[in-house]
Amino acid sequence: MADMAADQKEIDQEQNTADVLRDPNERPECFSSTIQECLFILTSTMAIGQTSFFQGAIIVVLAEISRDLNMDSAETTWSTAGVALSSGAFLLPFGKVADMFGRRTMFIASMIGYTLSLLVIGFANSALYFDILSGVMGIFCASSVPPAVGILGSAYEKPSPRKNKAFACFSAGNPLGYVGGMLVSGIASQVSTWRTSFWALAVIYVLFSITSIFTVPKEPSRAKVALTLENLNKLDPLGMLLAVAGIALFSSSLSLAGDAPQGWKTPYVIVLLILGILLIGAFIYWQSVCSTPLMPLYIWRDQNFSLLMGALSLGFMAFVSGQFWMALYMQQVQGYSGLGITVRLLPMVIGGVLVNVVCALILHRVSNKFLMFIATTAYMGAFLIASFTKEDSVYWGCYFVPFILMVVGADIEFNVVNMYVMSSLPPSEQSLAGGIFNTVSKLVSNVGLGVTTAIYNAVRDQVALR
């Protein structure tokens, strides 16, 4: 064990020595051309946006799916929550696996698996079929993100304008995937049925799956370890079990509480919540005593790291739930069609692209503290304005402005925090760094939806009693 750590440290030192003489703004040596580099970054952007693309696509046609497959409220909830739950639960384990046994193969296999899942889910003929496929799709989402982050982090090891541009593009996948999925689904469902929405996404991801085969850079053999029983034990199997079970149970309680018969007082919701918290607590304790932890706790002792992750958590809780409730409000209260909602959300896509372009140009020139101040202020302004929304509110005042400010907050925070997290761990653990970052963002998104759903139900019940 100590020998393996020493060998890896020596490899990292050799890489650092070799890189000293290179201009950090040059194209990384692992890419044979700028075209390959750009195509891989674009493919990675689509990889990190997989969960968001699916959730955005499904929200537009959820009512039609629920009616066609005779779903009850619980099954409808799982159709949207399943992908996020399984994705969030498996991100950390897959980060460790990618760092140890190779990122390239895992990334390509995950892209293909996600594409096939989109194709198959379009043939769903029952609620159970659809919900199970949603969970399976989440596993492929979880297995694609850590290797993508790991490859990018290793390729662009040193800070540079080129690295900022690469990660700004990559960071756009998560916030913009939701709206992109709505756009594809809105158009496809208008042309045909809800099934066409997923097949249209499958066609898009077929192209990127093929692209990944030719653009994902090959890894040096020394970057991987042999598949032996000893190395499998170093994956921290107990930590994986505790993390997956804890996150899954905790997230399930949040997702089910809104539609449970007695809300948060429903016995099975309480049991899931308590078990989830206990298992997450046990996971954290185990990481403090395990010799090869799944998630090194030392990174959380970095005050800046902890503060940034806290700010990101609060921001993403608001961003994801804000998108969901504003889209639902337009659908159920204002009566807009799926395509109508998509058109009204389109400024988020355009604004997000522009914000990421700006981030790529200024990240290495502007203080991170100032950028985080801009992001959090944008969030505050967005939801302050949105809180005054009424049924007859003008779109340009109560929707357009909050949408733009939400994207400004989300994309700036995502870029700043992502860059800092990637610099907190060595090149050999870049996939794990991506797993930690994305696990937190997925987990807090579920928390945000759970909290806002509870608030909505409480207000609805009070109104019903009047």
Image (cartoon, helix red, strand yellow):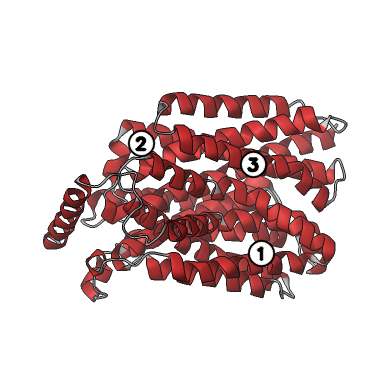
The disc, 3 or 2, on the residue closer to the chain's N-terminal end is: 2
Q: Which residue is mark 1?
A: 201
Tell me which amino acid carries mark 2. Answer: Phe
The disc, 2 or 1, on the residue closer to the chain's N-terminal end is: 1
Check whether the beta carbons of the residues at disc 2 and disc 1 lie within 8 A of each other.
no
Q: Which residue is mark 3?
A: 321
Residue 305 image label: 2
Q: Which SS class for mark 3?
A: helix
**Residue 242 in sight here:** no
For the residues labelled 2 and 1, the Cα–Cα distance comes to 35 Å
Quarter of image, res 299:
top left
Rendered location of residue 177, percent (x, y):
61, 51
Rendered location of residue 394, percent (x, y):
84, 30
Residue 421 image label: none
Check the image and report above or below for 162 versus 76. above
Classify 10 Å Cα crowding around label 3: few (below 14), some (14-19), many (20 and above).
many
Tell me which amino acid carries mark 1. Answer: Leu
Quarter of image, res 461:
top right
Tell me which amino acid carries mark 3. Answer: Ser
Rendered location of residue 391, percent (x, y):
86, 33
The disc, 1 or 3, on the residue closer to the chain's N-terminal end is: 1
Residue sitting at 86 percent across and 31 percent down? 466
